[in-house]
Image (cartoon, helix red, strand yellow):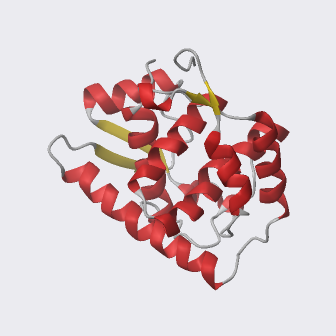
Amino acid sequence: MRQRDDLRLSFDPSAAAAVAAAHREAPRTGDAEALAAYAGLVAESDRLFRHITSGRRPVRIVFTMCPSQYTGADELIMSINRDRVLEITAAASERDRLHPFMDCSIGGEYDRFRAVHDVLGHGRLEVGFDRAGEYAAWRYQERFHGPVARRALATELHGEHSVRWITGESSEHKAALLDERFIARSRRGRARPRAIAH
């Protein structure tokens, strides 16, 4: 897999540990500022989804209840870039892990958000699902969002992935904002001498 030259950064493990702890301690649903950030994230993700599915080289998105369509990142990336198709397992299939703010019906807000992440983050960058790939995908995807929505995106992508990196377990979905100081520290990253491996 390749990686864009301007994203040759690696995550900082100590920053990721701080983000993971902040995510685990955060309430399931935040205050009015958090809900406004999530509303912005939903609106901006839907705009990106429309562009991805109807732009010059559209990707057809298929929402399914099947648990897994791809054997790994390479297969997902090939499906997006060569076949122009992405299958997404609907959030509704995990009834015990529904998002507290985004609609989790089949093809709903959360499913569309995940489709945007897979197409922009993994498909366009051609990075895997490992720590470094998810870090690069988050850093790239936030370029497509305004400053308010970026705060919710950090919770969704960097916060949840940091919990997985540190604990080895899936995190609880939350609609809360993490302390911006932790996120700013994570954004600095560390220089990476070669492309991200998968």
The residue shown at (33%, 33%) is 80
**Residue nearest the observer in this picture, 178 or 166:** 178
Is residue 119 visible to the viewer in this orientation of the structure?
A: yes
Placement of 170 over or under 23, stated as above or below: above
**Residue nearest the observer in this picture, 67 or 125:** 125
| Left or right of residue 41: residue 24 | right
**Residue nearest the observer in this picture, 71 or 147:** 147
Q: Residue furthest left?
A: 56
Give the percent coordinates (x, y) of residue 48: 33, 56
Query: Which quadrant holds the C terminus?
Result: top right
The residue shown at (73%, 44%) is 162
Placement of 151 over or under 7, stated as above or below: below
The residue shown at (75%, 70%) is 28
Give the percent coordinates (x, y) of residue 69: 48, 34
| Left or right of residue 145: residue 67 | right
Q: Residue furthest bottom?
A: 32
Placement of 136 over or under 196, stated as above or below: below
The residue shown at (39%, 65%) is 44
Is residue 64 visible to the viewer in this orientation of the structure?
A: no
Q: What is the count of numbered marks?
A: 0
Give the percent coordinates (x, y) of residue 87: 41, 41
Residue 122 lies in what quarter of the image?
Answer: top left
| Left or right of residue 107: residue 176 | right
Give the percent coordinates (x, y) of residue 175: 65, 69
Residue 166 lies in what quarter of the image?
Answer: top right
